Amino acid sequence: MGDLGKEIKSTFTNQRVKALLNIKYTANWLDQIGAAILKPYQISEQQYNILRILRGAGKAITVNEVKERMIQKSPNATRLMDKLCEKKLIERRRCENDRRVVFIQINRKGLDLLDKIDLKELDNCLNVLTEEEAVTLNRILDKIR
């Protein structure tokens, strides 16, 4: 079992400060694992998130809807979608009634890529929690937000 104080060679003024730093440290640790898993597919975690959102939507949705649903909010979400278009993983089209509105949809190549990506290693990181502990953790994280 890890101990944040030992891992970062630090002490904390109180348990709330330690909890805050522990959340940030753990999120970064999980991000590093996710980035390593996605590296062979040449997409970032944020690009993966966009593909996952589009797959879940099951239809074309607006760029703004994608931005609202993103786990990691990104000011450059449009640029991320541009890169996914360049890789031919998603398609975009303008709304016929309002040219300012752009619809985004995942295509077959994007769906096939998602099918190839195996996130078991990330899932294994959380297998150390019982279902009850996961419920408690979710409740606490929701309470913080």
Image (cartoon, helix red, strand yellow):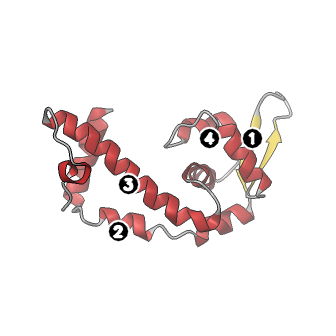
Q: Dots 1 and 3: beta carbons under 8 Å?
A: no
Badge 4 or badge 3: first in the primary sequence:
3
Q: Identity of the amino acid at label 3?
A: Trp
Residue farthest toward the left in the current orientation of the protein: 14
- Cα distance in 3D space between marks 4 and 3: 25 Å
Residue farthest toward the front in the current orientation of the protein: 9
Residue bearing the label numbered 4: 66
- Cα distance in 3D space between marks 1 and 3: 34 Å
Residue bearing the label numbered 2: 124
| Image x and y of residue 64, in percent | 65, 33
Residue bearing the label numbered 1: 103
Badge 1 or badge 3: first in the primary sequence:
3
Q: Secondary structure at mark 3?
A: helix
Residue at 40% from the left image edge and 49% from the top image edge: 28
Q: Secondary structure at mark 1?
A: strand
- Cα distance in 3D space between marks 1 and 2: 35 Å
Q: Identity of the amino acid at label 4?
A: Val
| Image: 142 above or below 97 | below
Badge 4 or badge 1: first in the primary sequence:
4
Badge 2 or badge 4: first in the primary sequence:
4
Q: Secondary structure at mark 2?
A: helix
Q: Identity of the amino acid at label 1?
A: Phe
Residue bearing the label numbered 3: 29
Nearer to us: label 1 or label 2:
2
